[in-house]
Amino acid sequence: MNKTRIVAIVGPTAVGKSQLALELAVRINAEIISADSMQVYRYLDIGTAKPTPDEQKKVKHHLIDILYPDEEFSAALFRQEAGEAISNVDGQGKVAIVAGGTGLYIKALTGGLFKGPGADQELRRVLKKKAVLAGNDCLYRELSELDPVTAARLHPNDSSRIIRAIEVCRLTKKPLSEYHEKHSFKDSPFDTFKIGLYIDRQDIYSRIEKRVDRMIAIGLVDEVKCLLDMGYTRDLNSMQGLGYKQITGYLLGEFSLDEAMLQVKQGTKKYAKRQMTWFRADPEINWYGYPYDYSRIIQKTKEFLEA
């Protein structure tokens, strides 16, 4: 059976994935599927660098604003939702471009997921309570001891994935990374052309600093305040995201706005570094360095789709 051909655009934050996705979508008659774990949430717009209304009018986007901030999302749910979106796009005779920096989502979609033990709700309740009382850092340190490989690829604030990794370790007595190593991750109904974008480290850091400054300038503080006023609490996974956690701390009087901005910039730089480590491990990615040769990327994409 012929597999549906899709395009994936990956790379670290602020590298230019969204811009390329828009340009490519116009050229190859495509729609865009967001592979960003934060853009699924309504009301989280500025801090997630969500496509603007004009951009979403220009090209149809999927998996944006599909959940409220107090709802849970996962790689398994992403695979399901993205698969349905791809089927709909393909049914219209169009191409699906999956664009985003959440590496686990891309891996889940294009290579399948490790089917681990079922959820232990009592254990999860205990771990969530521990995170509330002692902070996410406490859980992250525990995971670092149990499974340093998995800990290295997760953000310390990514409590849901940290809890899942600890859960697997405790229930099976084996680290999650060991299961991932044994899994072939070839269980996919898609034939994927993977495009990776990269920029010199200092340049990406400069872009991140400018992006954070702009987010503050266009209203990130007010966006977070509105979320808090609506009753969305800081312990939610959505509110633990970069920018939202730190600005919440500022609004609650824990530190100054300058300190919050510094934390966002430092955290985002570390996140970008982890993203590159993740994507560099994928031999299927076709890498393009800045300045990007859009015409060459478009040509190679068309060759893949027409082969």
Image (cartoon, rainbow, N blue to C red):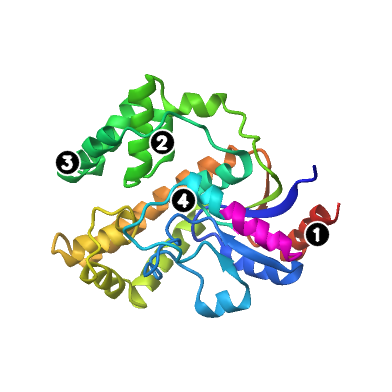
Q: Quadrant of the N terminus?
A: top right
Q: Which residue is mark 1?
A: 302
Crowd around label 1: few <14 · some 14–19 · many ≥20 (10 Å): some
Secondary element under disc 4, as helix, strand or loop, is: helix
> Amino acid type of disc 3?
Ala
Q: Which residues are magenta?
A: 82-98
- Give the residue type at disc 1: Lys
Apparent side of residue 297 relative to residue 183 in the rendered image (left or right): right
Q: Position of residue 156 (x, y in %)?
A: 33, 43
Q: Is residue 107 above or below residue 295?
A: above
- Quarter where residue 149 is shown: top left
Measure the alpha-carbon separation of dots 3 and 1.
52 Å
Identify the amino acid type marked 2.
Ala
**Is 97 or 23 nearer to us in this picture?**
97
How packed is label 2: few (under 14 Cα within 10 Å), some, or many (20 or more)? Answer: some
Counting residues from the start of the chain, the first of labels 1 and 4 encountered is 4
Q: Residues within 10 Å of mark 3 (few under 14, many from 20)?
A: few
**Does 157 appear above or below 65?**
above
For label 3, the residue is 134
Residue 291 marker: none
Give the CA separation, mark 1 to mark 2.
36 Å
Residue at the image point whose x is 39% and y is 70% from the top? 46
Q: Secondary structure at mark 3?
A: helix
Residue 83 inside the magenta-drawn segment: yes
Residue 131 falls left or right of residue 75: left
User: Any mark on residue 272, and which?
Assistant: 4
Q: Which residue is mark 2?
A: 152
Residue 198 seen from this side = no
Q: At which x and y percent is residue 219?
A: 33, 76
Q: State the residue at coordinates (40%, 41%).
A: 154
Q: Earlier in the sequence, mark 3 or mark 4?
A: 3
